[in-house]
Image: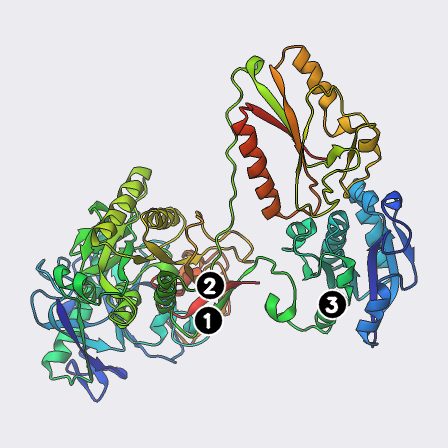
Amino acid sequence: MTYRIVHYINQFFAGIGGEEKADIAPEVRKAVVGPGMAFKAAFAGKAEIVGTVICGDTYFAEHIDDATDTIIKMISDLKPDAVVAGPAFNAGRYGTACGGVADAVSKRLGIPVVTGMYPENPGVDMYRKSIYIVPTADSARGIKDAVPAMAKLLLKMLEGGKLGSPAAEGYIPRGIRINTFYEEPGADRAVKMLVKKLKGEQFVTEYPMPSFDRVAPAAPVKDMKNATIAVVTSGGICPKGNPDHIEASSASKFGTYCIKDVQTADSEHYQTAHGGYDPTYANDDPNRVLPLDVLREKEKAGEFKKLYDYFSTTVGNGTSIANAKKFGLAIGKKLVDDGVDAVILTST
Amino acid sequence: MKLELLKAHVKNVEWGGKTALKGGVLTVDKAELLKAVADENFKKVDAELARPGESIRIVPVKDAIEPRFKVEGGGQEFPGVVSDVEPVGEGKTFVLEGAAVVTCGRIVNFQEGIVDMTGPAADYTPFSKTMNVVLIFEPVDGLEKHDYEKCCRIAGLKAALYLAQKAYEAGAEVDESKTYEILNFVESMKSYPGLPKVAYLYMLQTQGLLHDTYVYGIDAKRILPTIIHPNEVMDGAIVSGNCVSACDKNSTYTHQNNPVIRSLYEHHGKDLNFVGVIITNENVTLADKRRSSSYAVKLAKMFGVDGVVITEEGFGNPDADLIMNCRKAEAAGIKTTLVTDEYAGRDGASQSLADAAKEADAVVTAGNANMLIELPKLDKVIGYQDYANIIAGGFDGSLRADGSIEVELQAITGATCELGFTRISAETW
């Protein structure tokens, strides 16, 4: 028999449009759309796409519950044997939507479902425990590898095969601890590991410690009236023209700009570099993300002594934790060196 | 100090008129054995045999002990508990290798286990591979739990000593002899220049209230961390007196056959210089934890070691001791590897330990103790099978009407032993 597959994709991969069309409501087409063609080939006749459900990423994000209900109903009406979502690559909201849809398919319809994402897509952390996610490249250029891997995994699930380890099956580890047996007793493994560690050789821990990157909250500012306050944003607000070319996604840098005597982040002089949200309102009035106007008012009113003369900015959109940490440390150091007492962080 | 283990291989066990070992068969005089372990606090003591592969379930299991008897050198097995307090660890010790005394009977506390001699659980417990002489206890009415625990503990040790002594005196042949030696500090510190000096930081379960371990008869929660020679451990200087979940309590048998000590000896002089063992405890108050971890690491610094293997016993609260020992050792420039087990939930999705530290970058795990395992009905039950519903790792309904049992691995004796006794591990899927 040929398995019936429903494919979930966003407005962009459906060819409807980019950010400006991200607010379209769910719709269903009894057709193979966009990347569905590649899946059709990869299924090699063992499965067919009987319909495609399309939803705008913004619409999904802003109406999660209703959109999920509608999409699940659309999928269910097509009586599929399995569902494939995406791949979403490193698109954060698309990844989140694919994860949300896949999670709902798994829980409500109880049929196999597979999606694909770049390992650092925020959708991975949100959903990897509950669904199978195939690792992909960070952009649609990786579709050639992503689709066959997703199709293979989905077919295996459909054929009732028990899935093996993430490495063997090609999915992102779900964080599930599974018992296994080695050739050697644990004591011998521990002594050998110590010998390697002492020699400075590579060794592999059997239990990577969960990372608790806890940041202790700073003590409240005791004397606001005499405090120097800074503002830092991951919302991408930068001088018009984005002089340092901060990337719209996966930022590799941050910028620091002088705002001495600047009373407001007006649209004539500022814009956002951020590619992960609708920039219309931020570009209309950049104060919405970088509230210089309100901060100057409060400074004048004496609520604090001084607004620090520079702001730092980057784009928090698919930006790796490693980069974000690096930026944070560098920005923080300069603020401390310059005697700033407190900082307001704004996002998007 | 030098100790020679004279090993006689036990390939079968049977009842008979005289306790002796001949041709690999351990014959046991049951009446004499029961007399040797008699205690006025037992209403009844019985004994049974269980061999690998037999359709036998032993439950609830308290401890397992290897029969050993000192034939040369000072002291005797299990010093300070069933023998005099004089030091052990030198001379010659006779071992009935392949045999074990397993203590069982009316429950002391919830943390007792199951040993299946066949089936899926047999893959997890070390005591499905030994020829077992099982003692089944019934206490007199009104006996306090801690008194009952002590009686069970002592009876098991006496039985192990009895079997080895009688077999030796009846002329048992030694199949294999192995010598273990670490020189005194002056010599050992000069030995193997160029090889890293390594010690073993050996954590003993001492949370109290039936969670106790004894060293030369001293309750280890009352000790400051101290130094012990690895050979003393082989001679029964450390005995288990604890009711910790069956899967990761260190039975007296695993102390006697501590695999970390065995492995360090195997590496000694090849790629490391094994200079000694530091024992420490796992007490419950923060001050105790801080004192013991700091003191144990201080001893390691006094040794001047480059690395330590640290093993845990139990889980949850002792995870804090494990991590403190690790962090303080690493901060002192002493490299560590840890042996622990995991409580990652039945689905394996939870965080495995109650504490964590980035310094703990070299961890060996003895598996997820929360994993469910199904045990088929076995033909014979030694002990009381209905305890499967209340022992740690069991739950109401664990024992089914058909005699099969579903429990967490936690309930299987020695399944996730944090001395690294078995081959189990876990990986992330």
Relative to the observer, which residue lies in front, B358 or A264?
A264
Q: Amino acid at mark 3?
A: Asp
Q: Is residue B383 above or below residue B308?
A: below
Q: Is residue A123 above or below residue B153?
A: above
Q: Secondary structure at mark 3?
A: helix
Q: Amino acid at mark 1?
A: Phe
Q: Is residue A254 above or below residue B185?
A: above
The disc at residue A122 is: none
Estimate the spatial distance between the alpha carbons at disc 1 and disc 3, rounded to whole Å: 32 Å
Mark 1 or mark 2, earlier in chain: 1
Q: Is residue B1 visible?
A: yes
Image mark 3: chain: A
Q: Amino acid at mark 2?
A: Val
Image mark 1: chain: A
Residue at the disc numbered 2? A204
Q: Secondary structure at mark 2?
A: loop
Q: Is residue A256 left or right of residue A196?
A: right
The residue lying at 82 percent from left, 57 percent from top is A8
Residue at the disc numbered 3? A145
Relative to the observer, which residue lies in front, B152 or A213?
A213
Estimate the spatial distance between the alpha carbons at disc 2 and disc 3, rounded to whole Å: 28 Å
Q: Quadrant of residue B216?
A: bottom left
Estimate the spatial distance between the alpha carbons at disc 1 and disc 2, rounded to whole Å: 16 Å
Residue at the disc numbered 1? A181
In this view, the residue farthest toward the front is: A243
